[in-house]
Image: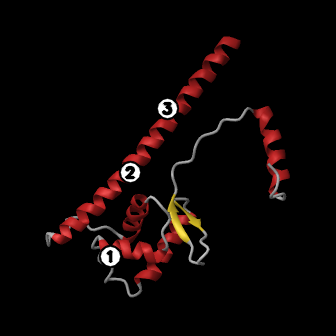
Amino acid sequence: MKDRLETYRQALEEAIREYERLSQKRARIDERLAQLLQTMGSLSRLCRLEPTVRFGLTDACRMVLKSAGHPLTAAEVKAKLESIGFDASRYANPLACIHTVLRRLRRSGEVRLVPRPEGKPAFDWQRPPKLVMVKANELDKLNLWLTSTRDDPNAE
């Protein structure tokens, strides 16, 4: 029984490692694809070509945030969209629509809010979460530690 349990644990650990490697690889590929889409959009515009597939605002915001590599404010997202030729003329107030999209992406967990000292919050693309496995008997200790440090900002 002990050998079987050890075999399962090893298989689980290997599956977690592979998942982490593939998640990191996918994040790099997604970021590069978003960069290429922006490049293609910009170059198409310079060549006076019309895109064959139009992005919706939500997908365009996703693309901009994925390729940015750093947090962007809604105004910066709007500027990036304009730079790649996204047609926002169908929106009466594009910035308000971008704010709405960013709030929805935040609620769905796709982006995270990053407070800035200047007061305008920025939004950053969420990378896939890292998996952590905790033994059941260690979970109580972890919960106790988290509870005790939540109210004490100086706790280690």
Q: Secondary structure at mark 3?
A: helix
State the CA–CA distance, disc 2 to disc 3: 18 Å
Q: Secondary structure at mark 2?
A: helix
State the CA–CA distance, disc 1 to disc 2: 21 Å
**Disc nearer the start of the sequence (1/2):** 2
Give coordinates of residue 20: x percent, y percent.
51, 38
Q: Residue at x 62, y 74 (%)?
A: 117
Q: Which mark is residue 1?
A: none
**Disc nearer the start of the sequence (3/1):** 3
Q: Secondary structure at mark 1?
A: helix
Give coordinates of residue 31: x percent, y percent.
39, 53
Q: Where's the N terminus, which quadrant? A: top right
Binning the other alpha carbons within 10 Å of mark 1 as few (below 14), some (14 to 19) or many (20 upward) gives few
Give coordinates of residue 79: x percent, y percent.
38, 76
Q: Residue at x 60, y 40 (%)?
A: 131
State the CA–CA distance, disc 3 to disc 1: 39 Å
Q: Residue at x 25, y 66 (%)?
A: 41
Give coordinates of residue 98: x percent, y percent.
45, 76
- By what rule are the colours in the image chosen? secondary structure
Q: How many numbered marks appear?
A: 3
Residue nearest the viewer, comparing 61 with 8: 61
* Residues at marks 2 and 3 touching, judged by CB atoms closer than 8 Å: no
* Amino acid type, residue under disc 2 in the picture: Asp
Q: In the picture provided, is 144 more to the left or to the right than 119?
A: right
- Residue at the spot of label 2: 30
* Amino acid type, residue under disc 1 in the picture: Glu
- Residue at the spot of label 1: 82
* Residues at marks 3 and 1 touching, judged by CB atoms closer than 8 Å: no
Which residue lies most toward the bottom here?
92
- Residue at the spot of label 3: 18
Binning the other alpha carbons within 10 Å of mark 2 as few (below 14), some (14 to 19) or many (20 upward) gives some
Q: Is residue 50 visible?
A: no
